[in-house]
Amino acid sequence: MKIELRPLTRENWRECARLELAPGQERFVATNVASIAESRFEPHYEPRAIYADREMVGFLMYCPEGDRETGLYWLFRLMTARAHQARGIGAMAVRAALEEIASRGGRVVKISHVPQNIVASKLYQRLGFRPTGEIEDGEVVLEMELPERSGL
């Protein structure tokens, strides 16, 4: 399976807005519609549709934190559509996002999740993120230093 991140466009944003989570997961992540709207008012946000073998299967969003010179980025939205969960898509999409971030000069990436989202916690830690001990907006914060050279 080939995972690709594509920018949201006039042609694909509606499809992204229609992607659904599995029942009960709504409390873990903002809706794609809210995230898309937010990205229109925050020009530094980078919304991405996740494609698996040319089919849209999810959404993520990241942004630089403050001055780009710091190299700090936040990956703050990640969702995989209900019909495509448990196939490793989330992990592959995060790796692809980390590659993009590294190519833009990112050196440190923070990510967060609600404390009850044990699946996200395990996924992020398996990918190399480590808890910082911080809680931001009620969410557990994890962090990863990116290697000097890309190759995640």
Image (spheres, rainbow, N blue to C red):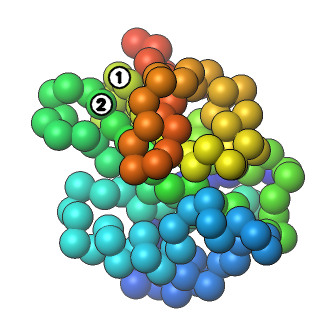
List x then y, in percent, for residue 141: 48, 35
Instruction: Note whether residue 92 is visible.
Output: no
Q: Where is the C terminus found, in terms of image quarters?
A: top right
Instruction: Note whether residue 29 is visible.
Output: yes
Label 1: which residue? 107
Marks counted in the figure total 2
Near-viewer residue (55 or 25): 25
Q: Earlier in the sequence, mark 2 or mark 1?
A: 2
List x then y, in percent, for residue 136: 39, 43
The residue shown at (51%, 30%) is 142
List x then y, in percent, for residue 144: 48, 23
Residue 117: give its label.
none
State the CA–CA distance, disc 2 to disc 1.
6 Å
- Identify whether 47 is placed above or below 18: above
Near-viewer residue (102 or 142): 142
Circles 2 and 1, Cβ within 8 Å, touching? The answer is yes
Near-viewer residue (70 or 24): 24
Element carrying mark 1: loop
Element carrying mark 2: strand
Amino acid type of the residue tagged 1 in the rendering: Arg
Label 2: which residue? 72
Amino acid type of the residue tagged 2 in the rendering: Leu
Relative horizontal placement of residue 133, taking residue 117 as reference (left or right): left
